[in-house]
Structures are given as structure tokens and as C-alpha cells.
Image (cartoon, grey):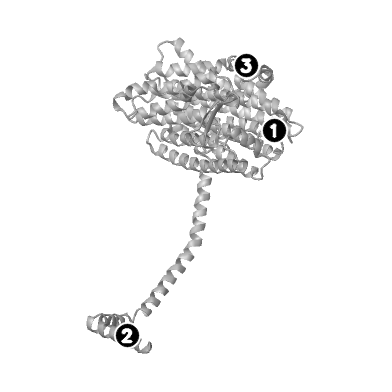
Amino acid sequence: MSTMMQMPVSWLGIIFLPLILAGLFVFKRIRPFLIKLVPLGALPALLASLFMHPGAGIKIPWLFFESMFVLDATGKMFLFFTSVLWLLAGMYSVCYVSDSSRRIRYFVCFLLAMSGNLGLILAQDVFSFYFLFALMSFSSFGLVVHEKSADAAYAGKIYLILVVIGEAFVFLGLLLLAHSTDTIYIHEAVKLLSSQPQCGTVMGLMFFGFGIKAGALPLHVWLPLAHPVAPTPASAVLSGAMIKAGLLGWVRFLPLGASGFQDWGYTIILLGIAAAIYGALVGLTQNKIKSVLAYSSISQMGMMTILVGVGLLNPAIWKKSWMVLMFYAVHHGLAKGALFLSVGTAVSQMKSNGLRLLRDMAVIWPAVAVVGLPFTSGEMAKGGLKMVLKKSSAVLPHVELILILVSVSAVTTALIMARFLWLTWRVKQETGETSRDVPGLMLPWMILVLLVFLFPFWITFLNVVPSDGMGLIIKADLKNMWPFGLAMGIFIAARLLRLTNPLRIPQGDVLWGYAKCVNGLRVWIIGIIKPLQKGRENLEGGLGILSENLLRPSKYIDSMVEFFSSWKVFGILIFSLCIILMMSLGW
């Protein structure tokens, strides 16, 4: 790579600074000071995303098998919103968990997960990528189980099981990719992948392995369990940043933009539509605010999954699909992070009515952006998605039906955001305003809300999406208001009629189905093993009787051994054997 040395070695602080801060927590005396420095762990990544040109990279000969880290155009976008979320969630955490007796463990896990999340965005070889992906995934377990409640323990168990399964899929996929293409560097390997006989296997392993992290159906069950039990700032980075690591894995390792994968593309598009609608509908049945937001994340990740499918279905417009996908990822990462942080600030005590009004407006705006009202980043992202689908009409079967389903998902998204706002208002009415450290919580949250509000205007500052591409996205259309209007009509009618939700789907939804399947498999295996076990017991009994009969003369053998063991008898025997031997030799 011609620009490989443009990245100074000091930029490796993106990965190593959070690791160093985590390691320094072994010194008890400086822990209070280190806690205040936690947010700064993401600062090098933020500066790199703003000021480093795409294409800068560095090779490290002594790390793994000559590791390579590169900031490409995709990485620049992901690094920006990921570092913003980690920085602001770190600021939020300093106040949010300051009174917790387990805060040291929380911050160590927080920093380790930060290092893995930021580092994998830059990693361009399979070994570094896998190590950093695993570091992020396993460190996040400490964030999920932080509260040490029964729910947290259960969520942590399910999370860890799925992490191990996902890591196994990804590990096998990476090994097969490197073996089949004879290179460990991701960009080169994926270019060669489409011509390899193992291509389908690698794609399947990568899609399901990263799909667990991305919350793809039906691999999403950890999200609605982990998000409600994790501390609020941890939920913000889980949903806003770490879930996007799965999306980044798809973009990195699937042959997007290559021809010959139309069936794959169509299947992934259908899975994305199913997730977009299913996630929102199940979220409407939830009573916990963060559970509602978790299912909303599943729904919105489904929309981004559609764009990944288009990249396989219609490689001719992959560049435009990539622009929309990057825009959507940044939009959702910032908006969903702001929504999760609002859970802890919506009930904060305000000194004046003006501040109270500002706070309430700040709660509403990210929800409005996710819904996609005109002149918001959400409307622009969804408009770009529809544009890409329409341009794929020649190769996409039933495109009109798919566009209708996308509009249906817009209705369900508006409904789930309305439920989020209503649950937030109800909690505030029931519990009243708290007196927590308002500035420490409000400042990072308000910064994030402001970024969501200004997103359509400052995105060009990153200099990643060209102006012609932006013209395809930033085009507010008032005709797209009808899903929002329909959703509001349904919600208001339901509240006026005091309709109650007849269906209560537990968190994890299809997890009970998986449990039933596993239990059924266990019963089936036991049914097979039991007869074998009885046969084994009968065989052991028969062998016992046989051995007893065979060993019955042993008492006579023991007497003979004792007799012949005496020195007198032993000597006579040896002398007799010598006489016989000499006679046989002709003496």
C-alpha cells in the first residue's frame, strides 16, 4: 500500500491507550484519578477519524504474522461514530457508576471492550481482527453482568453462549478464508474469495458469525436480555457501537460488489425485512424501556442488512449502496446511543422549567430521527435505502412488494418509538425526578443529541461521502409522512380507548423455542442412550460372572505360587533345569 507509512506509530494509541489505562488499575492509589481519565481512551480514535486521510496505514512485523492497520473510507466512518459513543459513554459512566462497589471491574471491562471495538475497525489482517473482535466480545460480558442480579446472570449466560458460538463461526471462516486465498490480509483475501470453491462456506460462516453480533434474525436473542440489565452507558455502546462490529464484519468479509451472488443477496434482503418488522412488533409488547430500545435496534439493523443484501444482489450500484449504508450506520449509532443515555437523564431533576423543557425536547429528537421525519437523518437514510432498492428493480424480484414492506417497517418503527416515549413519561410520573449528578449525565447526553440534530449538516466535514452521493441521500420528502401519521393515529386511538396489549412476549422471544428444541434433543439422546446403558449394565454383569468363574481356581494357583516361591524348591528347580539343559546339549 503506497500510503502505508502515512499513519504515525503514535496513532496506535487508538488501540493501546485504553489497554494501558486498564492495566494501570492494578495500582489502587491512582484508581480515583484513572476513573476520570477513562473517557480519554477514545480521544485518539476520534482525532484520527477527523484529521487522518483515508488510506493511511502501518504494518507491525512483530505483532502476530505482520499485522496491518489501515484507516480506509469505511473505517473512517465507523471510527468516527464509535469513538464519539465511547467518549461520551465514558463521561456518562464516570458519574453513573461512581457509587457502585464494582466500579473498578466495570471500568476495566469498559476500557478493554473499547480497545477491541476501536482496534478491529483498523485491523486489516485476519489475526488482528479476530483477536480484537474477541477482546471486545468477551470484555463486554463484564458489562452485562455488572449488576450481579439474577436477570444479569441469566443474560450473561445467554450472551456468553452466543459469543462463543459466534466466535467459533468467525474463527473457522477466517481460517478457511486465509487458507483458500493464501493471504492473511483482508482486502486481498476477499478480492480472491469469489473465485474459490470454498466461497459459499466462508460466506455462510461469516454471515452467521457476525450476524450474532449484529442481532440478525434468528440470532438476536442476546440483545433484549443484555441491554436492560447492563448499566445505561454500557447499553449505549452495546447498541450504538458494538452491534455495528457485526455489520462491519459483513462489509469487510462478504464479497460485496462482486457478481455471482444474487441468491445470497435476495435471501439476506428478505432476512433484513423480516428483522425490521419483527423486531419492532415484538418491541411493542415490552414493558421495560431498554427492552423496547433493544428490539428497536434489531429492527434498524434489519434495514442495514437490506443494504448488505443489495451489495450482493446488484454489484453495479454497490458504491451508492455503500454510501447509504455508511450514512445509516452513523445515523443509527448516534441516535440509538442518545436514546439509551436518555433513559438515565429523562428523570433527572431540573432547576427551571426552561431546562426541563430542553431536556424533554432532547429526549424526543433522537426518537424523531429514528422514525425518519422530514429533514432528519433518519428520513435521509431511509430515502437512500428506497432509492437503492428502486435502482435494483431490474434484478430484484417483487421490488414493489419489498418497498411496501419497508414502508410497513416505517410504521412499526414509529409505533415502537411512541411506546418508548410513553414508557419514559410513565416512569417519570411514577418515580418523579431524581437528584443524581445532573451535569455529569446531562452534558455527554446533550452533546450526543446535538450531534444527531446537526448530522445532516456536518457529515460533509468528514469528507468521506462525495457531494453527488449526498445528493442521493439528503432529500426530504413530505410525502413520506404517511407512515408516521398512520402510526400516531393507531397509538392515539389505542390510548384513548385504553386498549391493553393482549400479548406479552418475554425478553428473548424465540429463546424459549431454542430451549424447547435443546430440551427435546436432550430427551431424544437420553432415549437412545438408556437402552445402550442397560445393555452395558447387562454386559458388565455377564463379564463379572465370567471373570468370577475364570478366577475361581485362583486359590490353588496362589498355593502353588507360594510353594514354588520358597528358596529350597526354587533351587531344586533351577538345578534340575540345568541338568536337563546339559543333557540336551550332548554332555
Mark 3 or 2: the one toward you: 2
In terms of sequence position, does the residue under pointer 1 or pointer 3 come before the other? Answer: 3
Q: CA distance from mark 1 to mark 3?
A: 24 Å
Q: Quadrant of the N terminus?
A: top right
Give the mark, 2 or 1, whose residue is nearer the N terminus. 1
Specify the amino acid type for callout 3: Phe
Mark 1: secondary structure:
helix
Crowding near pointer 1: few (<14 within 10 Å), some, many (20+)?
some
Quick one: label 3 or label 2, which is nearer the N terminus?
A: 3
The vertical placement of 257 against 547, above or below, is: above
Disc 1 marks which amino acid? Ile
Q: Residue at x 63, y 30 (%)?
A: 409
Seen in the picture, residue 547 relative to 84 is either above or below; the reply is below
Quarter holding residue 68:
top right
Residue 402 marker: 1
Q: Is the Cβ of the residue at disc 1 closer than 8 Å to that at disc 3?
A: no
Q: Secondary structure at mark 2?
A: helix
Looking at the image, which residue is at 56% across and 32% down? 124
Q: Residue furthest front?
A: 587
Question: Would residue 496 be seen by someone viewing this image from the given angle?
Answer: no
Alpha carbons under labels 3 and 2: distance apart: 111 Å
Q: Closer to the camera, 363 or 490?
A: 363
According to the picture, the residue beneath numbered tag 2 turns out to be 577
